[in-house]
Image (cartoon, rainbow, N blue to C red):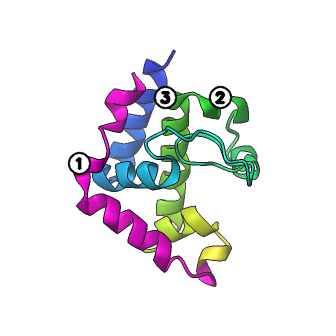
Amino acid sequence: MVSMPLIEFAFIAQMCAFNVDTFRALVFVESSNCRLMTNSKSTARGCGQILKATAKEYSLDYGKLLGKGYSLWATAKVLCDLKRRFPKSYLCAYHLGPKGHKTGDCSEYLMKITKALTRKNNYEIVLKEAK
């Protein structure tokens, strides 16, 4: 069952022209490479820490976000939509939400992503980990 979401993830990543390293860095920052699948302070779940309201908005199965394969696919789906809607600020939109990214400050979040990108050895290849 995990292989299907990974195939779909690869298709979405290619369709959205993701930088795979940026995606991996986002997963590292959000969940320490899918090690922290839940957040006790919010309804965030999965590798991309998707909120329950976001899961509903994108017709995602909130319960399945605890599975790595589905979670990575769901994260890519949300990120792809945000990249289409906000090409220059999609990472901020992911972090603060589509409405909040216009007025909120995401500089600290972007610094975390940048730091993760410059320390590639700090995270494993997420797709291999999900198999």
Who's the residue at 74% across and 48% down the image? 43
Between circles 3 and 1, the one closer to the viewer is: 1
Who's the residue at 51% across and 15% down the image? 1
Residue 63 spot, x, y in % from top left: 71, 30
Between circles 2 and 1, the one closer to the viewer is: 1
Who's the residue at 30% across and 37% down the image? 125
On residue 64, the disc is 2
29 shown above or below 87: above
User: Magenta part mainly helix, strand or loop?
Assistant: helix
Label 1 sits on residue: 121
Whichever of callouts 2 and 3 sits on the residue coming sooner in the sequence is 2
Label 3 sits on residue: 69
Residue type marked 2: Lys
Relative to 23, is 67 on the left or the right?
A: right
Q: Is residue 98 magenta?
A: no
- Proximity of marks 2 and 3: CB atoms separated by less than 8 Å: no
Magenta range is 102-131
Residue type marked 1: Asn
Task: Describe the element under mark 1 as helix, strand or loop.
Answer: helix
Task: Describe the element under mark 2 as helix, strand or loop.
Answer: helix
